């Protein structure tokens, strides 16, 4: 009776194994894709939140400041910005260790506050100070390092802020323009 | 040729071609649906990026308006404001409308409203971004 007992032929075994392999491979790649999607979404969220915080802080600083380094007449784009506040405080934006760092120094040059913004996309800030009809606008643009694999990327219009906007209604003695 | 007692061998069940085909078909359908969903996620993210770009653009435009003098804050002059190149590139068929409305209470003021809308992938309008600011006459002496 031993001959009658059906067994698996080697070909059948190989076939079923390769079939299983394909299915498991598909499942693994799907899982990987989903995990990657999750990670990308988290980074995206962190990026958007950080960008909003930075933009808000940048606008507040520029509106409260009276002078900038670089000068509005020195056309060009820089990766560092210094804002002078009426009381003599200096707000300094720059890039350090892949982070955008905001430092505030008092009149004596001592640090008062320090903040760092980390963008998952490793975007770098570009500051531009320009004059338009007697007003000075400072633009902060966050430029992502170019990645040809990502194809068409939505370019950031940046954040514009009007210099000394908060001081417009003050008299000259109070530090207004 | 076959021994009479080998009914077990005859009854031996294996997958028929039909069963294998149905399984493969179901697997293909499941994979297609999954890929489609991944595609939708990517589309939604792109739409969210566009909206964020539009929000930044709207904030920038309002900031530029804030720098203007009182007599420059009229619907005619505001109509001349155009979108930045980045926004034009990111927002297909973008349409910007800005208007200034007079209001007397509680003080002479102008209500400046900004409306920005653009087309989505299917050609319809995305829900617009609306931003409103008030400018007061007392701010004339800047």
Image (cartoon, coloured by chain):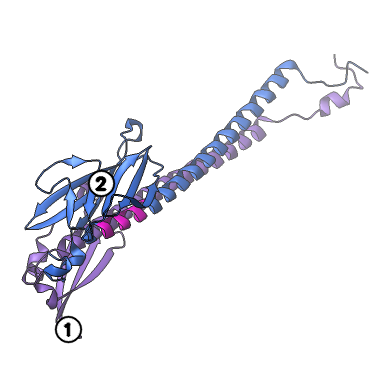
Name the image quarter holding the N terminus of chain A. top right
Indicate the position of residue A148 as horizontal and vertical percent values: 32, 31
Nearer to us in this view, B92 or B22: B92
**Image x and y of residue B68, in percent:** 11, 65
Residue with the mark numbered 1: B107
Residue B86 at least partly seen: yes
- At mark 1, the secondary structure is loop
Say whether marks 2 and 1 touch (CB < 8 Å).
no
Q: Residue at x 44, y 47 (%)?
A: B41
Q: Please state which of residues A108 and A157 is positioned toward the viewer in this rendering.
A: A108
Residue at label 2?
A: A141
Q: Label 2, label 1: how many angstroms apart (C-alpha)?
A: 37 Å
Write down the quadrant of residue B135 in the picture.
bottom left
Task: Identify the subunit bearing mark 2.
Answer: A
Which hue is chain A drawn in? blue
Q: Residue furthest front?
A: A108
Q: Which residues are magenta?
A: A51-61
Q: Chain of mark 1?
A: B
**Residue B122 in view here:** no
Q: Is residue A114 magenta?
A: no
Q: Nearer the viewer, residue A111 or A145?
A: A111
Are labels 2 and 1 on one chain?
no
Q: Residues within 10 Å of mark 2 (few under 14, many from 20)?
A: many
Q: Which residue is at the front of the view, A151 or B63? A: B63
The residue carrying pointer 1 sits among few (fewer than 14), some (14 to 19) or many (20 or more) residues within 10 Å by Cα, namely few
């Amino acid at each position: 009776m031993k001959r009658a007992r059906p067994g698996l032929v080697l070909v059948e075994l190989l076939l079923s194994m390769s079939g299983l392999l394909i299915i498991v491979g598909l499942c693994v790649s799907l899982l990987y894709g989903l995990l990657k999607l999750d990670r990308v979404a988290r980074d995206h969220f962190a990026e958007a939140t950080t960008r909003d915080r930075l933009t808000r802080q940048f606008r507040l600083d520029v509106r409260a400041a009276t002078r900038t380094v670089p000068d509005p007449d020195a056309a060009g784009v820089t990766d560092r910005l210094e804002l002078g506040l009426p009381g003599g405080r200096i707000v300094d934006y720059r890039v350090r260790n892949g982070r955008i760092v905001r430092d505030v120094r008092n009149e004596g040059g001592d640090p008062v506050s320090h903040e760092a913004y980390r963008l998952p996309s490793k975007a770098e800030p570009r500051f531009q100070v320009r004059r338009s009809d007697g007003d000075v606008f400072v633009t902060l643009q966050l430029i992502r390092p170019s990645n040809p694999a990502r194809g068409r990327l939505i370019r950031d219009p940046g954040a514009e802020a009007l210099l000394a906007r908060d001081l417009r209604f003050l008299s000259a003695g109070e530090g207004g323009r | 040729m076959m021994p009479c007692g080998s009914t077990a061998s005859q009854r031996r069940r294996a997958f028929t071609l039909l069963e294998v085909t149905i399984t493969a078909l179901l697997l293909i359908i499941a994979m297609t649906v999954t890929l489609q969903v991944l595609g939708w996620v990517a589309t939604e993210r792109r739409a969210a990026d566009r909206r964020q770009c539009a929000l930044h653009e709207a904030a920038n435009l309002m900031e530029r308006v804030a720098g203007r003098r009182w007599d420059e804050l009229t619907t005619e002059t505001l109509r001349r404001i155009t979108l930045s190149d980045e926004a034009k590139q990111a927002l297909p068929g973008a349409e910007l409308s800005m208007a200034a409305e007079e209001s007397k209470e509680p003080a002479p003021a102008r209500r400046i409203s900004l409306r920005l809308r653009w087309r989505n992938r299917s050609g319809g309008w995305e829900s617009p971004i609306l931003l409103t600011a008030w400018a007061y006459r007392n701010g004339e002496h800047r």
